[in-house]
Amino acid sequence: MPDWLDALLSWLQGSALGEAVRGTPFLYPTVEGIHILGIALLVGPAFAFDLRLLSVGRRLLSVTTAARYLLPISHIGLVVALVTGVALFSAQPTVVADSSAAPWKLGLLLVAGVNVLVFHSGVYRRVGEWADAAVAPVAARAAATVSLTAWTGVIFAGRLLAYT
């Protein structure tokens, strides 16, 4: 690990946040529970939207209606998961960084984030042209597949952080 990264992780671990999460009774498990709820709010609606892009429920709900109802909930979950994730990480960043699952989790988070940006700045900008089509464009279906795979990987890698 580079010296600058080790110094940054040590600083975070010794920060007031790291000390509080690590040292306050029941704070870590409470934050962890809220983190899991944030993940559920993020991934549940995102998976439902991804499945809609893959034509599940296409006769019941348009892509735009699914986006209007599901994505705001997913955005709330993202904020909750990010804030609580940073708090959890601050408790033992040097230990977490040494886990073999850490690069996987970080890498898959980046893949998921880039996928969202590419989807929304690309094929979704023309959703009006294909929202009612029998099958979404290949780019939309590919984005949904990447999303389902990346978020599943993030969850598995996150759980493995405690064991590797």
Image (cartoon, rainbow, N blue to C red):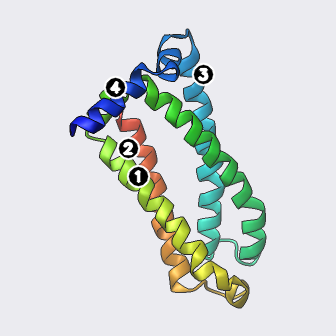
The residue that mark 2 highlights is 157
Among the two numbered marks 4 and 2 on one chain, the one whose residue lies closer to the N terminus: 4
Residue 54 in sight from this viewpoint: no
Q: N-terminal of the two: label 2 or label 3?
A: 3
Name the residue that disc number 4 marks. Answer: 10
C-alpha gap between disc 1 and disc 2: 6 Å
| N-terminal-most mark, 3 or 4 | 4
Where does residue 12 sit, x and y in percent of width and height? 42, 27
Q: Contact, CB < 8 Å: mark 1 with mark 2?
A: yes
Identify the residue shown where x is 45% and y is 67%: 146
| Label 1 CA crowd tier, 10 Å (few <14, some 14–19, many 20+) | some
Give the residue type at disc 1: Gly
* Residue 94 or residue 115, whichever sits in front: 94
As drawn, the label of residue 153 is: 1
Q: Earlier in the sequence, mark 3 or mark 1?
A: 3
Residue on which the image places disc 3: 30
Q: Secondary structure at mark 4?
A: helix
3D distance between C-alphas at marks 3 and 4: 23 Å
